[in-house]
Amino acid sequence: MNSLHHDLYQKIKRYVLSHVRDKQDAEDIVQDIFIKIQLQQHQVRNPEKLIGWMYRIAKNSIIDHYRLRKKEQTGMLVEVTDDRHIFNECVEQCLMELAKTLPSPYQEALELSEKQNISQTELAKRWNISYSGAKSRIQRARQMLKGKLQTLYRIETDAYGNILVCENREHCSCNAAHTLQEELNRII
């Protein structure tokens, strides 16, 4: 570890120790923080905001630590991350349903490019259009689908892309979203 990394590690460790008195817990939290930083470093677009971003991860990790401790003390330890797949599946189901409502060329574009993994070059040949035309059609299809999704649902994700909140702005055939969100609200 070079001196810059060592200094940063020590600063984050002091920050965590100022909020978590148990030294072993603090060490565990710091290790988790640096794992998160390593896994999520691609998200930082502005290097000037790197330090603030790292401290935000540290702050959130400390909050998570205390939430977990509170749940352990009250006997309500529930592994929330195990249920996130329900949200992911719900949104995937909703996306598939919404894709069916797109106009035919855009529906086909998503089907072939996303589900069947056919390259844009191959689609251009198949549709007898230019490569940029095929690319534009796929992008328009994605934009249309995104617009429909944002109109019908409020979705929030964590840093890993797991769906944390899926609220229907209108009625959805997927009842898992409301049920799981109510459970998460009760626990947290």
Image (cartoon, rainbow, N blue to C red):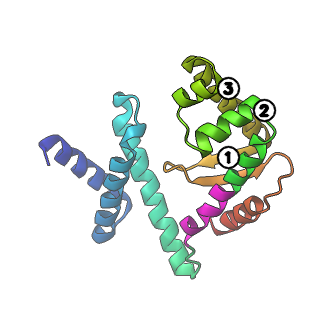
Q: Which residues are magenta?
A: 79-89
Tell me if label 2 and label 3 are in contact, CB under 8 Å.
Answer: no
Residue that mark 3 sits on: 140
Q: Quadrant of residue 35?
A: bottom left
Residue that mark 2 sits on: 104
Question: Which structural element holds mark 3?
Answer: helix
Q: Does 127 lie within the magenta span?
A: no
Q: Quadrant of the C terminus?
A: bottom right
Residue 42 vertical position relative to residue 167 in the rendered view, above or below: above
N-term mark: 1 or 3: 3
Q: Which mark is residue 155?
A: 1
In this view, the residue in front, 21 or 115, is 115
Query: Does the magenta stretch mainly form a helix, a strand or a loop?
Result: helix
Amino acid tagged 2: Ser
Residue 149: x percent and y percent?
A: 73, 40
Residue 160 visible within the image:
yes
In this view, the residue in front, 83 or 187, is 83
Residue drawn 14% across the image and 49% down it: 1
Calculate the distance from the C-alpha at mark 2 to the C-alpha at mark 1: 26 Å
Residue 59 vertical position relative to residue 131 in the rendered view, above or below: below
Question: Which structural element holds mark 1?
Answer: strand
Which numbered disc, 2 or 3, marks the residue closer to the eye? Answer: 2
Calculate the distance from the C-alpha at mark 2 to the C-alpha at mark 3: 12 Å
Amino acid tagged 1: Ile
In this view, the residue in front, 98 or 125, is 125
N-term mark: 2 or 1: 2
Residue drawn 52% across the image and 27% down it: 121
Which numbered disc, 1 or 3, marks the residue closer to the eye? Answer: 3
- Judged left or right of residue 47, residue 79 is right
Residue 145 visible within the image:
no
Question: Which structural element holds mark 2?
Answer: helix
Amino acid tagged 3: Arg
